[in-house]
Amino acid sequence: MRVVVIGGVAAGPKAAAKVMRLRPDADVTVIEKGKFLSYAGCGLPYYISGAVREQAELMSTAIGVVRDAEYFRSCKGIAVLNRTEAMRIDRRRGRVEVKDLSNGGTRWLEYDKLVLATGARPVVPPIPGKELRNVFVVHHVEDAEAIRTAIAETGIRKVVIVGGGLIGVEMAEALSRRGVHVAIVEMLPQVLPMLDWEMARQVEKHLIEKGVSVLTESRVLALEPGQLNDTAVGRVRMERETLPADMVILAIGVRPNIQLAETADLEIGPTGAIQVNAHMRTSDPDIYAVGDCVESTNLVTGKPCFVPMGSTANKHGRVAAMNICGENDTFPGVIGSTVCKVFDYTVARTGVGEEEARAAGFDVATCLNSVPDKAHYYPPAKPLMLKLIADRKTRRLLGAQATGPSDASKRIDVAATAITAGLTVDQVAKLDLAYAPPFSPAMDNLIVAADILRNKMDQQLRSLTPMQVKRMLEAGEDVFLLDTRSPAEYEQAHIEQSTLIPLGVLRERADEVPRDKPVIAFCKSSLRAYEAARILHGRGHANVKVMDGGIVMWPYELAD
Protein backbone atom coordinates (compact mmCIF):
# COMPACT_ATOMS: atom_id res chain seq x y z
CA MET A 1 0.00 0.00 0.00
CA ARG A 2 1.40 3.37 -1.06
CA VAL A 3 0.45 6.25 1.23
CA VAL A 4 1.48 9.83 0.51
CA VAL A 5 1.09 12.43 3.24
CA ILE A 6 1.24 16.12 2.32
CA GLY A 7 2.34 18.09 5.40
CA GLY A 8 5.02 17.23 7.93
CA VAL A 9 4.31 19.23 11.08
CA ALA A 10 1.69 17.64 13.37
CA ALA A 11 -1.22 15.69 11.87
CA GLY A 12 0.80 14.43 8.89
CA PRO A 13 3.61 12.73 10.83
CA LYS A 14 1.05 11.33 13.28
CA ALA A 15 -0.90 9.72 10.44
CA ALA A 16 2.25 8.45 8.76
CA ALA A 17 3.67 6.91 11.95
CA LYS A 18 0.37 5.21 12.84
CA VAL A 19 0.07 3.72 9.35
CA MET A 20 3.55 2.22 9.70
CA ARG A 21 2.72 0.77 13.11
CA LEU A 22 -0.40 -0.89 11.74
CA ARG A 23 1.06 -1.83 8.36
CA PRO A 24 4.84 -2.24 8.60
CA ASP A 25 4.86 -3.30 4.94
CA ALA A 26 3.34 0.01 3.75
CA ASP A 27 5.24 2.47 1.57
CA VAL A 28 4.72 5.83 3.30
CA THR A 29 6.11 9.16 2.06
CA VAL A 30 5.73 12.54 3.78
CA ILE A 31 6.04 15.70 1.71
CA GLU A 32 6.91 18.89 3.60
CA LYS A 33 7.40 22.30 2.01
CA GLY A 34 9.47 23.63 4.91
CA LYS A 35 12.81 22.62 6.29
CA PHE A 36 11.68 21.51 9.74
CA LEU A 37 9.58 18.46 10.55
CA SER A 38 7.20 17.55 13.34
CA TYR A 39 7.90 20.66 15.39
CA ALA A 40 5.84 22.06 18.25
CA GLY A 41 4.26 25.14 16.69
CA CYS A 42 2.41 25.88 19.94
CA GLY A 43 5.79 26.17 21.65
CA LEU A 44 7.09 29.03 19.48
CA PRO A 45 6.17 31.83 21.94
CA TYR A 46 8.08 30.00 24.68
CA TYR A 47 11.14 29.70 22.45
CA ILE A 48 10.92 33.44 21.77
CA SER A 49 10.66 34.20 25.50
CA GLY A 50 13.64 31.99 26.32
CA ALA A 51 11.67 29.49 28.41
CA VAL A 52 12.59 26.95 25.71
CA ARG A 53 16.31 27.51 25.30
CA GLU A 54 17.22 25.60 22.15
CA GLN A 55 15.43 25.48 18.80
CA ALA A 56 16.01 21.72 18.62
CA GLU A 57 13.83 21.19 21.70
CA LEU A 58 10.79 22.14 19.61
CA MET A 59 11.32 19.20 17.26
CA SER A 60 12.76 16.58 19.58
CA THR A 61 11.28 13.50 21.18
CA ALA A 62 10.90 13.30 24.96
CA ILE A 63 14.39 11.74 25.16
CA GLY A 64 15.98 14.45 23.04
CA VAL A 65 16.17 12.83 19.59
CA VAL A 66 15.58 15.38 16.82
CA ARG A 67 12.73 14.36 14.52
CA ASP A 68 14.49 15.02 11.20
CA ALA A 69 14.30 13.10 7.92
CA GLU A 70 16.86 10.55 9.09
CA TYR A 71 14.89 9.94 12.29
CA PHE A 72 11.72 9.21 10.33
CA ARG A 73 13.60 6.94 7.92
CA SER A 74 15.51 4.91 10.49
CA CYS A 75 13.07 4.87 13.44
CA LYS A 76 9.72 4.96 11.64
CA GLY A 77 10.42 3.54 8.19
CA ILE A 78 8.95 6.67 6.60
CA ALA A 79 10.46 8.47 3.61
CA VAL A 80 10.46 12.25 4.09
CA LEU A 81 10.85 14.79 1.30
CA ASN A 82 11.29 18.13 3.03
CA ARG A 83 11.86 21.37 1.11
CA THR A 84 9.44 19.78 -1.36
CA GLU A 85 6.13 21.31 -2.42
CA ALA A 86 3.03 19.42 -3.56
CA MET A 87 1.89 21.22 -6.70
CA ARG A 88 -1.25 19.38 -7.79
CA ILE A 89 -3.24 16.19 -7.32
CA ASP A 90 -4.26 13.95 -10.20
CA ARG A 91 -7.16 12.10 -8.61
CA ARG A 92 -8.00 10.05 -11.70
CA ARG A 93 -4.54 8.48 -11.87
CA GLY A 94 -3.84 8.54 -8.12
CA ARG A 95 -0.71 10.68 -8.12
CA VAL A 96 0.71 13.94 -6.78
CA GLU A 97 3.08 16.25 -8.62
CA VAL A 98 5.86 17.51 -6.34
CA LYS A 99 8.56 20.14 -6.78
CA ASP A 100 12.00 20.00 -5.18
CA LEU A 101 12.48 23.54 -3.89
CA SER A 102 16.26 23.17 -3.80
CA ASN A 103 16.65 22.61 -7.56
CA GLY A 104 13.21 23.27 -9.06
CA GLY A 105 12.81 19.74 -10.42
CA THR A 106 9.36 18.14 -10.53
CA ARG A 107 8.13 14.57 -10.54
CA TRP A 108 5.01 12.50 -9.82
CA LEU A 109 4.41 10.35 -6.74
CA GLU A 110 1.77 7.64 -7.03
CA TYR A 111 -0.53 6.81 -4.12
CA ASP A 112 -3.19 4.35 -3.10
CA LYS A 113 -4.24 6.62 -0.24
CA LEU A 114 -3.48 10.33 0.11
CA VAL A 115 -3.53 12.37 3.33
CA LEU A 116 -3.79 16.17 3.19
CA ALA A 117 -2.24 17.75 6.28
CA THR A 118 -1.59 21.14 4.72
CA GLY A 119 -2.34 23.09 7.89
CA ALA A 120 -3.27 26.74 8.07
CA ARG A 121 -1.61 30.01 7.15
CA PRO A 122 -1.47 33.24 9.14
CA VAL A 123 -3.87 36.00 8.17
CA VAL A 124 -1.96 38.98 6.80
CA PRO A 125 -4.40 41.81 6.09
CA PRO A 126 -3.73 44.33 3.31
CA ILE A 127 -2.25 46.91 5.68
CA PRO A 128 0.03 49.43 3.95
CA GLY A 129 3.59 48.91 5.19
CA LYS A 130 3.27 45.21 6.03
CA GLU A 131 6.37 44.56 3.87
CA LEU A 132 8.62 46.73 6.09
CA ARG A 133 11.46 45.10 8.01
CA ASN A 134 10.73 43.88 11.54
CA VAL A 135 7.11 43.03 10.69
CA PHE A 136 6.54 39.38 11.57
CA VAL A 137 3.98 36.63 11.90
CA VAL A 138 4.47 33.74 14.35
CA HIS A 139 3.82 30.53 12.47
CA HIS A 140 7.04 28.69 11.65
CA VAL A 141 10.30 28.01 13.43
CA GLU A 142 11.94 30.48 11.05
CA ASP A 143 9.57 33.21 12.24
CA ALA A 144 10.50 32.62 15.87
CA GLU A 145 14.20 32.58 15.03
CA ALA A 146 13.93 35.86 13.12
CA ILE A 147 12.11 37.54 16.02
CA ARG A 148 14.69 36.36 18.55
CA THR A 149 17.53 37.56 16.32
CA ALA A 150 15.94 40.97 15.76
CA ILE A 151 15.48 41.54 19.49
CA ALA A 152 19.03 40.43 20.28
CA GLU A 153 20.80 42.30 17.50
CA THR A 154 18.86 45.43 16.56
CA GLY A 155 17.90 47.05 19.85
CA ILE A 156 14.15 46.42 19.76
CA ARG A 157 12.45 48.26 22.63
CA LYS A 158 8.81 48.78 21.59
CA VAL A 159 6.66 46.06 20.02
CA VAL A 160 3.09 46.39 18.81
CA ILE A 161 1.07 43.18 18.49
CA VAL A 162 -1.84 43.46 16.07
CA GLY A 163 -4.44 41.02 17.35
CA GLY A 164 -5.46 40.07 20.88
CA GLY A 165 -6.27 36.41 20.39
CA LEU A 166 -4.35 33.42 21.74
CA ILE A 167 -1.12 34.07 19.83
CA GLY A 168 -1.33 37.79 20.59
CA VAL A 169 -1.56 37.43 24.36
CA GLU A 170 1.01 34.61 24.48
CA MET A 171 3.41 36.76 22.47
CA ALA A 172 2.75 39.70 24.79
CA GLU A 173 4.13 37.68 27.68
CA ALA A 174 6.98 36.21 25.62
CA LEU A 175 8.21 39.60 24.43
CA SER A 176 7.71 41.28 27.80
CA ARG A 177 10.00 38.67 29.30
CA ARG A 178 12.62 39.70 26.75
CA GLY A 179 12.58 43.19 28.27
CA VAL A 180 10.62 45.07 25.61
CA HIS A 181 7.48 47.16 26.02
CA VAL A 182 4.44 45.56 24.40
CA ALA A 183 1.18 47.06 23.18
CA ILE A 184 -1.72 44.91 21.97
CA VAL A 185 -4.02 46.48 19.38
CA GLU A 186 -7.34 44.65 18.98
CA MET A 187 -10.18 45.63 16.66
CA LEU A 188 -12.84 43.96 18.82
CA PRO A 189 -14.10 45.32 22.18
CA GLN A 190 -12.02 42.74 24.09
CA VAL A 191 -8.94 40.57 23.96
CA LEU A 192 -9.38 36.79 23.70
CA PRO A 193 -12.68 36.64 21.80
CA MET A 194 -12.91 32.95 22.76
CA LEU A 195 -14.06 34.24 26.18
CA ASP A 196 -17.15 36.14 27.22
CA TRP A 197 -16.50 39.82 27.91
CA GLU A 198 -16.45 39.73 31.71
CA MET A 199 -13.91 36.89 31.68
CA ALA A 200 -11.75 38.51 29.00
CA ARG A 201 -11.80 41.74 31.00
CA GLN A 202 -10.11 39.97 33.93
CA VAL A 203 -7.29 38.88 31.61
CA GLU A 204 -7.02 42.38 30.17
CA LYS A 205 -6.66 43.84 33.67
CA HIS A 206 -3.87 41.33 34.39
CA LEU A 207 -2.07 42.24 31.16
CA ILE A 208 -2.17 45.90 32.14
CA GLU A 209 -0.88 45.08 35.62
CA LYS A 210 2.09 43.39 33.93
CA GLY A 211 2.92 46.52 31.93
CA VAL A 212 1.25 45.62 28.63
CA SER A 213 -0.70 48.42 26.92
CA VAL A 214 -4.07 47.15 25.67
CA LEU A 215 -5.99 49.10 23.04
CA THR A 216 -9.34 47.51 22.16
CA GLU A 217 -11.79 48.73 19.52
CA SER A 218 -8.76 50.02 17.62
CA ARG A 219 -8.21 49.46 13.91
CA VAL A 220 -4.74 49.61 12.34
CA LEU A 221 -4.67 51.79 9.24
CA ALA A 222 -1.00 51.56 8.24
CA LEU A 223 2.50 50.54 9.30
CA GLU A 224 4.97 53.33 8.66
CA PRO A 225 8.77 53.63 8.66
CA GLY A 226 10.45 55.47 11.46
CA GLN A 227 12.20 57.89 9.11
CA LEU A 228 11.91 58.89 5.48
CA ASN A 229 13.33 56.17 3.18
CA ASP A 230 13.76 53.82 6.15
CA THR A 231 12.95 50.20 5.37
CA ALA A 232 12.12 49.22 8.96
CA VAL A 233 8.82 49.77 10.72
CA GLY A 234 8.73 52.71 13.11
CA ARG A 235 5.08 53.52 13.76
CA VAL A 236 1.63 51.95 13.79
CA ARG A 237 -1.04 54.40 12.66
CA MET A 238 -4.57 53.79 13.92
CA GLU A 239 -7.84 55.68 13.67
CA ARG A 240 -7.40 57.61 16.93
CA GLU A 241 -3.65 57.57 17.61
CA THR A 242 -0.22 56.49 16.43
CA LEU A 243 2.06 54.16 18.38
CA PRO A 244 5.86 54.00 18.10
CA ALA A 245 7.03 50.51 17.15
CA ASP A 246 10.46 48.97 16.57
CA MET A 247 8.72 45.69 15.72
CA VAL A 248 5.18 44.64 14.75
CA ILE A 249 3.75 41.15 15.24
CA LEU A 250 0.71 40.32 13.10
CA ALA A 251 -1.32 37.88 15.22
CA ILE A 252 -4.73 38.16 13.61
CA GLY A 253 -5.45 34.47 13.24
CA VAL A 254 -5.13 31.72 10.65
CA ARG A 255 -7.02 30.37 7.66
CA PRO A 256 -6.96 26.79 6.38
CA ASN A 257 -4.64 25.93 3.49
CA ILE A 258 -7.10 24.49 0.99
CA GLN A 259 -5.56 25.37 -2.38
CA LEU A 260 -4.59 21.79 -3.24
CA ALA A 261 -8.01 20.51 -2.18
CA GLU A 262 -9.80 23.20 -4.19
CA THR A 263 -7.87 22.58 -7.39
CA ALA A 264 -8.54 18.85 -6.95
CA ASP A 265 -12.30 19.63 -6.68
CA LEU A 266 -12.63 18.24 -3.18
CA GLU A 267 -15.60 19.43 -1.15
CA ILE A 268 -14.99 22.58 0.93
CA GLY A 269 -17.20 23.11 3.98
CA PRO A 270 -19.14 26.23 5.04
CA THR A 271 -16.28 27.32 7.33
CA GLY A 272 -13.90 27.52 4.37
CA ALA A 273 -11.97 24.44 5.48
CA ILE A 274 -11.90 21.00 3.86
CA GLN A 275 -15.04 18.99 4.56
CA VAL A 276 -14.47 15.49 5.94
CA ASN A 277 -16.64 12.79 7.46
CA ALA A 278 -16.14 11.20 10.86
CA HIS A 279 -13.49 8.91 9.35
CA MET A 280 -11.49 11.99 8.19
CA ARG A 281 -12.29 11.04 4.59
CA THR A 282 -12.86 13.79 2.04
CA SER A 283 -15.34 13.69 -0.84
CA ASP A 284 -12.80 11.41 -2.57
CA PRO A 285 -12.78 8.02 -0.81
CA ASP A 286 -9.03 7.64 -1.37
CA ILE A 287 -8.12 11.05 0.06
CA TYR A 288 -8.15 11.94 3.75
CA ALA A 289 -7.62 15.37 5.32
CA VAL A 290 -6.44 16.10 8.85
CA GLY A 291 -5.32 18.93 11.10
CA ASP A 292 -5.69 22.67 10.66
CA CYS A 293 -6.90 22.45 7.06
CA VAL A 294 -10.19 20.72 7.93
CA GLU A 295 -13.39 21.67 9.68
CA SER A 296 -14.88 19.82 12.61
CA THR A 297 -18.33 19.49 14.15
CA ASN A 298 -19.16 21.43 17.29
CA LEU A 299 -20.56 18.80 19.64
CA VAL A 300 -22.70 21.34 21.51
CA THR A 301 -24.37 23.06 18.54
CA GLY A 302 -24.00 20.27 15.98
CA LYS A 303 -22.75 22.82 13.44
CA PRO A 304 -19.50 22.86 11.42
CA CYS A 305 -16.66 24.80 13.03
CA PHE A 306 -13.02 25.64 12.35
CA VAL A 307 -10.98 25.26 15.53
CA PRO A 308 -7.31 24.68 14.66
CA MET A 309 -5.48 23.03 17.57
CA GLY A 310 -2.38 20.86 17.77
CA SER A 311 -4.17 18.43 20.07
CA THR A 312 -7.01 17.98 17.57
CA ALA A 313 -4.55 17.59 14.68
CA ASN A 314 -2.87 14.63 16.36
CA LYS A 315 -6.23 12.93 16.98
CA HIS A 316 -7.18 13.51 13.34
CA GLY A 317 -3.97 11.89 12.17
CA ARG A 318 -4.54 8.76 14.23
CA VAL A 319 -8.16 8.35 13.08
CA ALA A 320 -7.23 8.77 9.40
CA ALA A 321 -4.44 6.21 9.71
CA MET A 322 -6.72 3.67 11.38
CA ASN A 323 -9.22 3.90 8.55
CA ILE A 324 -6.54 3.83 5.85
CA CYS A 325 -5.38 0.53 7.35
CA GLY A 326 -8.86 -1.02 7.33
CA GLU A 327 -9.92 -0.30 10.90
CA ASN A 328 -13.12 1.56 11.77
CA ASP A 329 -12.34 4.64 13.84
CA THR A 330 -14.15 7.96 14.01
CA PHE A 331 -13.56 11.50 15.19
CA PRO A 332 -16.86 12.86 16.55
CA GLY A 333 -15.99 16.54 16.80
CA VAL A 334 -14.80 19.17 19.23
CA ILE A 335 -16.12 21.47 21.93
CA GLY A 336 -13.42 24.10 21.61
CA SER A 337 -11.44 23.29 24.73
CA THR A 338 -8.56 25.75 24.98
CA VAL A 339 -6.03 26.78 27.61
CA CYS A 340 -3.22 29.33 27.60
CA LYS A 341 -0.83 30.98 30.00
CA VAL A 342 -0.91 34.79 30.31
CA PHE A 343 1.80 35.84 32.76
CA ASP A 344 0.55 34.61 36.17
CA TYR A 345 -2.94 33.72 34.90
CA THR A 346 -4.21 30.51 33.42
CA VAL A 347 -6.97 31.14 30.87
CA ALA A 348 -9.19 28.26 29.79
CA ARG A 349 -12.55 27.60 28.19
CA THR A 350 -14.64 24.78 26.77
CA GLY A 351 -18.03 24.38 25.14
CA VAL A 352 -19.86 27.48 23.94
CA GLY A 353 -19.97 31.01 25.29
CA GLU A 354 -23.10 32.84 26.38
CA GLU A 355 -23.86 34.61 23.09
CA GLU A 356 -22.93 31.57 21.02
CA ALA A 357 -25.35 29.49 23.09
CA ARG A 358 -28.15 32.02 22.56
CA ALA A 359 -27.45 32.14 18.83
CA ALA A 360 -27.76 28.33 18.75
CA GLY A 361 -31.26 28.57 20.24
CA PHE A 362 -30.60 27.57 23.85
CA ASP A 363 -32.47 29.14 26.78
CA VAL A 364 -29.32 30.33 28.51
CA ALA A 365 -28.59 30.43 32.22
CA THR A 366 -25.17 31.54 33.51
CA CYS A 367 -23.30 32.03 36.74
CA LEU A 368 -20.05 33.62 37.85
CA ASN A 369 -18.10 32.35 40.82
CA SER A 370 -14.77 33.15 42.43
CA VAL A 371 -13.38 31.21 45.39
CA PRO A 372 -9.87 29.91 46.20
CA ASP A 373 -8.64 26.98 44.12
CA LYS A 374 -7.78 24.92 47.20
CA ALA A 375 -8.65 24.94 50.89
CA HIS A 376 -8.44 28.60 51.94
CA TYR A 377 -6.12 27.76 54.83
CA TYR A 378 -3.61 25.88 52.66
CA PRO A 379 -0.94 28.17 51.21
CA PRO A 380 -0.87 29.39 48.55
CA ALA A 381 -4.62 29.31 47.90
CA LYS A 382 -5.33 31.53 44.89
CA PRO A 383 -8.57 32.87 43.43
CA LEU A 384 -10.16 31.02 40.52
CA MET A 385 -12.78 32.88 38.48
CA LEU A 386 -15.33 30.60 36.81
CA LYS A 387 -18.25 31.09 34.47
CA LEU A 388 -20.71 28.32 33.62
CA ILE A 389 -23.28 28.36 30.80
CA ALA A 390 -26.24 25.97 30.77
CA ASP A 391 -29.58 25.39 29.06
CA ARG A 392 -32.54 26.11 31.35
CA LYS A 393 -34.82 23.70 29.50
CA THR A 394 -32.66 20.60 29.71
CA ARG A 395 -30.32 21.81 32.49
CA ARG A 396 -27.45 20.55 30.34
CA LEU A 397 -24.04 22.13 30.85
CA LEU A 398 -23.08 23.95 27.64
CA GLY A 399 -19.86 25.81 28.43
CA ALA A 400 -17.31 26.78 31.04
CA GLN A 401 -14.66 29.49 31.25
CA ALA A 402 -12.00 30.06 33.89
CA THR A 403 -9.12 32.38 34.65
CA GLY A 404 -6.97 33.54 37.52
CA PRO A 405 -3.61 32.75 39.13
CA SER A 406 -4.72 29.22 39.88
CA ASP A 407 -5.36 25.78 38.42
CA ALA A 408 -8.01 26.61 35.84
CA SER A 409 -7.15 23.74 33.50
CA LYS A 410 -8.26 21.03 35.94
CA ARG A 411 -11.78 22.45 36.23
CA ILE A 412 -12.12 23.08 32.51
CA ASP A 413 -11.02 19.53 31.72
CA VAL A 414 -13.70 18.19 34.07
CA ALA A 415 -16.25 20.53 32.47
CA ALA A 416 -15.16 19.40 29.00
CA THR A 417 -15.76 15.80 29.98
CA ALA A 418 -19.17 16.67 31.41
CA ILE A 419 -20.19 18.63 28.29
CA THR A 420 -19.06 15.82 26.00
CA ALA A 421 -21.05 13.32 28.04
CA GLY A 422 -24.13 15.58 27.99
CA LEU A 423 -24.29 15.93 31.78
CA THR A 424 -26.68 18.34 33.46
CA VAL A 425 -25.52 20.85 36.04
CA ASP A 426 -27.28 18.68 38.62
CA GLN A 427 -25.04 15.78 37.68
CA VAL A 428 -21.95 17.97 37.63
CA ALA A 429 -22.77 19.12 41.17
CA LYS A 430 -22.69 15.50 42.32
CA LEU A 431 -19.41 14.48 40.64
CA ASP A 432 -17.08 12.56 42.94
CA LEU A 433 -13.98 14.71 42.39
CA ALA A 434 -10.72 14.11 44.20
CA TYR A 435 -10.27 16.23 47.34
CA ALA A 436 -7.41 17.11 49.63
CA PRO A 437 -6.62 20.60 50.98
CA PRO A 438 -3.52 21.11 48.79
CA PHE A 439 -5.58 20.49 45.65
CA SER A 440 -9.11 21.84 46.10
CA PRO A 441 -11.72 23.01 48.58
CA ALA A 442 -13.94 20.30 50.05
CA MET A 443 -16.59 21.50 47.63
CA ASP A 444 -14.61 21.90 44.41
CA ASN A 445 -14.91 25.20 42.54
CA LEU A 446 -16.75 23.54 39.67
CA ILE A 447 -19.23 21.89 42.02
CA VAL A 448 -19.90 25.18 43.83
CA ALA A 449 -20.49 26.92 40.50
CA ALA A 450 -22.85 24.14 39.42
CA ASP A 451 -24.79 24.50 42.69
CA ILE A 452 -25.07 28.26 42.16
CA LEU A 453 -26.44 27.65 38.69
CA ARG A 454 -28.90 25.11 40.07
CA ASN A 455 -30.09 27.64 42.65
CA LYS A 456 -30.64 30.20 39.90
CA MET A 457 -32.57 27.81 37.67
CA ASP A 458 -34.65 26.67 40.65
CA GLN A 459 -35.53 30.31 41.47
CA GLN A 460 -33.80 30.10 44.86
CA LEU A 461 -31.29 32.73 43.75
CA ARG A 462 -32.02 35.81 41.70
CA SER A 463 -28.94 37.53 40.38
CA LEU A 464 -27.50 40.21 38.14
CA THR A 465 -24.16 40.22 36.36
CA PRO A 466 -21.63 42.95 37.22
CA MET A 467 -22.31 44.45 33.79
CA GLN A 468 -26.03 44.70 34.51
CA VAL A 469 -25.34 46.34 37.86
CA LYS A 470 -22.96 48.82 36.26
CA ARG A 471 -25.54 49.76 33.63
CA MET A 472 -28.17 50.33 36.32
CA LEU A 473 -25.83 52.62 38.25
CA GLU A 474 -24.85 54.54 35.12
CA ALA A 475 -28.52 54.97 34.21
CA GLY A 476 -29.17 56.50 37.63
CA GLU A 477 -31.60 53.80 38.72
CA ASP A 478 -32.56 54.01 42.38
CA VAL A 479 -31.10 50.80 43.81
CA PHE A 480 -29.64 49.86 47.19
CA LEU A 481 -26.18 48.33 46.69
CA LEU A 482 -25.53 46.18 49.78
CA ASP A 483 -21.92 45.26 50.58
CA THR A 484 -21.95 42.36 53.05
CA ARG A 485 -18.17 42.13 53.57
CA SER A 486 -16.20 43.14 56.65
CA PRO A 487 -15.23 46.77 57.40
CA ALA A 488 -11.57 45.93 56.66
CA GLU A 489 -12.45 44.58 53.24
CA TYR A 490 -14.59 47.62 52.54
CA GLU A 491 -11.79 50.01 53.48
CA GLN A 492 -9.40 48.25 51.14
CA ALA A 493 -11.64 48.65 48.08
CA HIS A 494 -15.34 49.06 47.43
CA ILE A 495 -17.87 49.97 44.79
CA GLU A 496 -19.00 53.57 44.85
CA GLN A 497 -22.61 54.09 45.97
CA SER A 498 -22.53 50.87 48.00
CA THR A 499 -23.60 50.60 51.65
CA LEU A 500 -21.65 48.40 54.07
CA ILE A 501 -23.69 46.11 56.33
CA PRO A 502 -21.57 43.04 57.19
CA LEU A 503 -23.37 39.71 57.04
CA GLY A 504 -22.70 39.08 60.73
CA VAL A 505 -24.82 42.07 61.78
CA LEU A 506 -27.39 42.02 58.99
CA ARG A 507 -30.12 40.39 61.07
CA GLU A 508 -29.99 43.16 63.68
CA ARG A 509 -29.61 45.91 61.07
CA ALA A 510 -32.07 44.55 58.50
CA ASP A 511 -34.37 47.55 58.98
CA GLU A 512 -31.66 49.72 57.38
CA VAL A 513 -32.24 47.92 54.10
CA PRO A 514 -35.07 49.68 52.23
CA ARG A 515 -38.10 47.70 51.12
CA ASP A 516 -39.25 50.19 48.49
CA LYS A 517 -36.35 49.80 46.05
CA PRO A 518 -34.36 46.98 44.45
CA VAL A 519 -31.58 45.59 46.66
CA ILE A 520 -28.40 44.19 45.10
CA ALA A 521 -26.22 42.30 47.55
CA PHE A 522 -22.59 41.35 47.02
CA CYS A 523 -19.44 40.38 48.90
CA LYS A 524 -16.03 39.11 47.83
CA SER A 525 -17.41 36.14 45.88
CA SER A 526 -21.16 36.62 46.59
CA LEU A 527 -21.47 33.54 48.81
CA ARG A 528 -22.12 35.78 51.83
CA ALA A 529 -24.37 37.89 49.63
CA TYR A 530 -26.49 34.83 48.89
CA GLU A 531 -26.88 34.27 52.65
CA ALA A 532 -27.86 37.93 52.99
CA ALA A 533 -30.43 37.62 50.22
CA ARG A 534 -32.01 34.63 51.94
CA ILE A 535 -32.10 36.48 55.27
CA LEU A 536 -33.78 39.51 53.68
CA HIS A 537 -36.18 37.32 51.71
CA GLY A 538 -37.23 35.66 54.95
CA ARG A 539 -37.94 39.08 56.41
CA GLY A 540 -40.26 40.02 53.58
CA HIS A 541 -37.95 41.87 51.20
CA ALA A 542 -39.45 41.03 47.82
CA ASN A 543 -36.83 42.45 45.48
CA VAL A 544 -33.36 41.27 46.50
CA LYS A 545 -30.80 40.09 43.98
CA VAL A 546 -27.19 38.95 44.24
CA MET A 547 -24.37 40.26 42.07
CA ASP A 548 -22.75 37.32 40.29
CA GLY A 549 -19.10 36.71 41.10
CA GLY A 550 -18.84 39.36 43.80
CA ILE A 551 -16.34 42.17 43.93
CA VAL A 552 -13.54 39.87 42.71
CA MET A 553 -15.24 39.71 39.31
CA TRP A 554 -16.23 43.39 39.19
CA PRO A 555 -14.51 44.35 35.91
CA TYR A 556 -14.50 48.10 36.56
CA GLU A 557 -12.58 50.55 38.74
CA LEU A 558 -13.07 50.36 42.50
CA ALA A 559 -13.00 53.13 45.08
CA ASP A 560 -10.49 52.97 47.94
Image: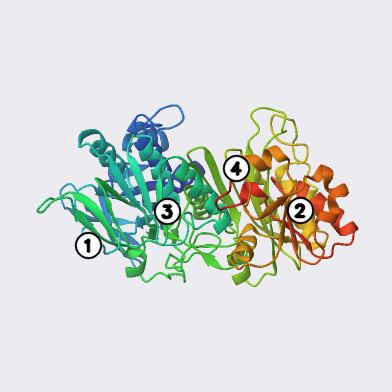
Instruction: Give the distance between the C-alpha atoms of the residues marked 3 and 4, in whole angstroms.
Output: 21 Å
Q: In which quarter of the image is residue 144?
A: top left
Residue named by callout 2: 452
Q: Could you tell me if residue 41 is visible in this image?
A: no
Instruction: Give the distance between the C-alpha atoms of the residues marked 1 and 4, in whole angstroms.
Output: 40 Å
Label 3 element class:
loop
Q: In the rendered picture of this protein, how many numbered marks are placed on residues?
A: 4
Could you classify mark 4 by the number of other residues whose Cα lies within 10 Å: few (under 14), some (14-19), or many (20 or more)? many
Image quadrant in which the C terminus is located: top right
Badge number at residue 164: 3
Residue named by callout 1: 128
Q: Which of marks 1 and 4 is nearer the N terminus?
A: 1
Instruction: Give the distance between the C-alpha atoms of the residues marked 4 and 2, in whole angstroms.
Output: 20 Å
Q: Earlier in the sequence, mark 4 or mark 2?
A: 4
Q: Which of marks 2 and 1 is nearer the N terminus?
A: 1
Q: What residue type is labelled 2?
A: Ile
Numbered disc in front, either 1 or 4: 1
Q: Which amino acid does label 1 sit on?
A: Pro
